[in-house]
Image (cartoon, rainbow, N blue to C red):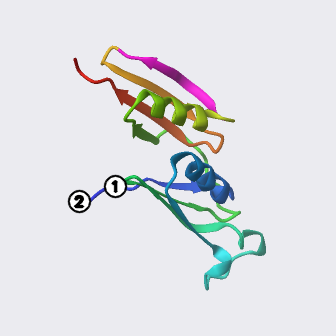
Amino acid sequence: MKDITPYLTFNGTCRQAMTFYKDILGGDLELMDFASSPMDVPDEAKNYIMHAILTSNGVTLMASDTMPNQPVTNGNSVSLSINCQSTDEINHLFNSLSDGGQITMPLEDTFWGSRFGMLTDKFGTCWMFNYDYPQA
């Protein structure tokens, strides 16, 4: 198996969510809306995203919108976990992605020698952040 790529589904906010993630994570974002496909879709869904892919520093995140008559129910069964490389990085990513969202566990030092925190962003996506402190 080469890798596993998280694939998120949104209720018409895929473009906004993936742009938000690109602004924070950097990288390249490709968006294809339903209007540019040969599929027959309702007029209200033409600008919805059929497929999005964000690639940044070895991380790939894919997503799409669902059709208006097939709403997504956001749950807490999947989280996107980011292993950070510095305290500056974990603080920046955590603070940026928590904007408009809900912090479920503030960033704090842990008993396992890491800095860790969790949140749900304003689009309903659950995130986990970890930075392993260098061993002395």
Apparent side of residue 95 relative to residue 35 in the rendered image (left or right): left
- Of all residues, the one furthest to the top in this rendering is 111
- Circle 1: residue type: Ile
Q: Are marks 2 and 1 in contact (CB under 8 Å)?
A: yes
- Circle 2: residue type: Met
* Highlighted range, magenta: 101-110
- Indicate the secondary structure of the residue bearing disc 2: loop
Which mark is drawn over residue 1?
A: 2
Residue at left offset 59%, top offset 27%: 103
Label 2 and label 1: CA atoms lie apart by 8 Å
Apparent side of residue 110 relative to residue 118 in the rendered image (left or right): left
Question: How crowded is the residue under tag 2: few (<14 C-alpha within 10 Å), some, or many (20+)?
Answer: few
Image x and y of residue 59, in percent: 40, 52
- Of all residues, the one furthest to the bottom in this rendering is 38
- Indicate the secondary structure of the residue bearing disc 1: loop
Image x and y of residue 95, in percent: 58, 31
Quadrant where the N terminus lies?
bottom left
* Total number of numbered discs in the rendering: 2
- Classify residue 11 by image quadrant: bottom right
Apparent side of residue 107 relative to residue 32 in the rendered image (left or right): left
Q: Main secondary structure of the magenta part?
A: strand
Quadrant where the C terminus lies?
top left
The answer to whether 66 is drawn above or below residue 21 in the figure is below
Question: In the rendered structure, does residue 105 fall within the stretch colored magenta?
Answer: yes
Q: Nearer the viewer, residue 134 or 65?
A: 134
Which mark is drawn over residue 4?
A: 1
